[in-house]
Amino acid sequence: MCKKGVISLFTASLLMTMTVMPSVEAAGFELSITGKKMLAQTKTSSATSIAQALAKQEANLVSLQQKDTTLSQQTSAIYYENKEAEARLRTQLKQHQADKIATLNQDVTSTKKRYEPLFTLYSSLTKELALARKIKNKELTAAVKAQVDTTKVAVTLAKEDIRRKQAKLSAAKKTRDEAVKKVKNSLAQQDPVKVQIKSTKSNMSAAKKRFTAEMKNFNVIVKKKEGAEVLASLTKLATIAGEIVAQKESIISLEMKVKQIIAGAGKQLI
């Protein structure tokens, strides 16, 4: 494969990964087909109280599975909304007052260029005056000095004009920089929230590992069809699943905080 083809393939692969990778994946609490079959047989062979408890925990696990899937979709949606919103805002920050500053900058540049002949003339006249004084020609010195004095007034006014326009440019840049800094400081408020999200995801990852381990244990125990042991394992599965769901709800709450921070920062950009 040619180098261009390799790059294209890599780019396509990267885009595909970014598209399908959710912020928080669905956990998957569903029992295997064999597990469901063995559980059904265990309920049939167990005392009524145990059978009812098994049915309740099984239904609880199914409910948590459905809730987990919904939460995963919601979390992924708000995560990408936040990423896009922040990206748009940071683009706006780069472009903030850009047209105004470009106009002011062009005004300074064109003004300097317009006065260049005047400055050149003044420089030339001052050299002529120095030369006239050097050769001690009073009439020439007086004539040139009169031109220098007249030109000097124009030069002073020209320099003042340039300074005013440079001051306007500097003020606009300062206003722009202060506004951008204010927004960036506001955006920085999401950093500790993102740390919380990362911590919660880490806890959730640990819970998923515990769920996977317990599911393996359940698949072994359920084959024995001993109601009390199966109930204990199934209850543990439901408890861990509940923890995972609660952590996803927490992540959504934190992502909502991030959303509010980004929106609030955007409103400050004037």
Image: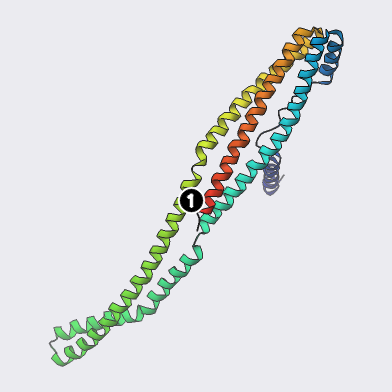
Q: Residues within 10 Å of mark 1 (few under 14, many from 20)?
A: many
Residue 44 to residue 187: above or below = above
Q: Secondary structure at mark 1?
A: helix
Instruction: Residue 28 in the image: state x and y as whole percent.
Output: 74, 27
Q: How is the image coloured?
A: rainbow
Residue lying furthest front: 49
- Horizontally, residue 255 falls left or right of residue 127, namely right
For this rendering, which residue is in front, 98 or 187? 187
Instruction: Residue 188 in the image: state x and y as whole percent.
Output: 49, 43
Residue 126 to residue 18: above or below = below
Q: Which residue is pictured at 65% across the width and 31% down the height?
A: 248
Q: Which residue is pictured at 58% across the width and 49% down the height?
A: 87
Residue 252 to residue 150: above or below = above
Taking the image as drawn, is residue 21 in sight? no
Amino acid under disc 1:
Val
Residue tagged 1: 183
Number of residue marks: 1
Indicate the quadrant where residue 140 lies. bottom left
For this rendering, which residue is in front, 134 or 240? 240
Work out which quarter of the rendered image holds the N terminus and state it. top right
For this rendering, which residue is in front, 209 or 126? 209
Instruction: Residue 138 in the image: state x and y as whole percent.
Output: 13, 90
Q: Which residue is pictured at 57% across the width and 32% down the height?
A: 198
Instruction: Residue 227 in the image: state x and y as whole percent.
Output: 79, 8
Residue lying furthest bottom: 139
